Amino acid sequence: MSQALDIQIPDIEKALENLSEFPKDKKHNKACLFTLIIYAHEPKRIKQHQELIDNILDKFPCRIIFIQGEDKSTKYLHVGVANVKSGQEGTTVICDQITIKASQSELARVPYIVIPHIIPDLPVYLLWSQTPFKEHIIFPSLQPYASRIIFDTECSESLHQFSEEMLENMNVLKMDVMDINWALISNWRDMLVQLFDTPTKLSSLQKCKSLKITYNNAKTEMSCCPAIRAIYLQGWLASKLKWGYSNVEKSDNSTIINYDTNDHPSIVTLRSENDEKLPSGAIISIELNTVDGFLINISRNQSLSQAVIHISSQEQCELPYTLPLPDVHQGLTFMKEIFYHKLSDHYLDMLKIISKMDKSVL
């Protein structure tokens, strides 16, 4: 990023045009695929979203408008502009970044600064660090211009409450919606669909009596609820298999969720482990036991971006094999998921399961 320039609000476009850190030659061109408007109101979320901006710009050149709410008792409104690089060496392009820092009392002015700098005839994506249903100052003004909103679920006070709010307001948004944590389990969802891709294997899954999902509980400054992806994954499976939610309880370092099926009860255990090599919240392994004695163990091989599958019973033990399990925490797969894929009914069915769970546990 070039050094940010502090400017007056009327001079934003002129300042962007005058920025000249990068020479205008064949190796450096200006480009933009969409406008990305980001809102964060906590210092740790501001840092987290800046890292996400860097990952986005590696793949997609775009105009960034970064709104940072600040807890200041006095009136404060500051605007800065900078050039940022997009792409890898040899294919570098230049993008604009406008950063707006505002105290709570000045947030009402922010939409009037943002809207004139949305690039016409290109998509507008919103990345919100809180559910917009509670943010009534900036989001309502920008909503008519946006074609997609991307949520950071972890910023919600309660996953149970978030699920209820999403189910109630999805139709009100009138735009595409993407949940970052739903995108982050897309690799596991795709792998499981590939694993249980025959009637025989699907039958084994439907006979599941116990399911254990182990996730990385290494908490960081920016990750305060590492269990979200594990909760999502089991909720997706439960909704696909049409399990009926019964109850949930905490036990030591595990969360135990009980379901009823047509033929037998199913017990889901979400177990936490610390693995410094993996991102916080990442799924580590899945273990599935069926009523007819089959054990299916799925573990990740992070270095090879693969899932290692072991299937055994009292009578036989199959040779282990692998399926693709790409790292979606960064790279093109994740970016395509959050910007271009649409949420399916599976997501809403998963939220219905989670909304029934005891909110004191979630």
Image (cartoon, helix red, strand yellow):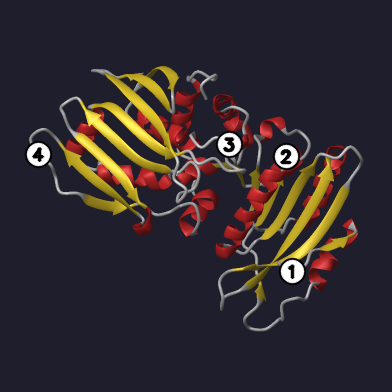
Q: Quadrant of the N terminus?
A: bottom right
Spatial CA distance of label 2 from label 1 is 29 Å
Mark sitting on residue 2: 1
Q: In percent of the image, x 66 and y 47: which residue is there?
A: 146
Rendered location of residue 72, percent (x, y): 86, 40
Mark sitting on residue 139: 2
| Disc 2, SS | helix
Q: Nearer the viewer, mark 3 or mark 1?
A: 3
Mark sitting on residue 34: none
Say which label, 1 or 4, has the lower sequence index. 1
Q: Residues within 10 Å of mark 1 (few under 14, many from 20)?
A: some
> In this rendering, does residue 256 appear at all?
yes
Rendered location of residue 124, percent (x, y): 66, 52
User: Splitting the image into 4 quarters, where does residue 121 fall?
Assistant: bottom right
- Residue 85 vs residue 96, the one in the foreground: 85
Spatial CA distance of label 3 from label 4 is 42 Å
- Amino acid type of disc 1? Ser
| Disc 4, SS | loop
In the rendered structure, the answer to whether residue 110 lies left or right of residue 205 reads right
- Residue 74 vs residue 127, the one in the foreground: 74
- Amino acid type of disc 2? Phe
Spatial CA distance of label 3 from label 1 is 32 Å
| Disc 3, SS | loop
Q: Nearer the viewer, mark 2 or mark 4?
A: 4
Mark sitting on residue 316: 4
- Reading the image, the residue beneath label 3 is 224
Say which label, 3 or 1, has the lower sequence index. 1
| Disc 1, SS | loop
> In this rendering, does residue 145 appear at all?
no
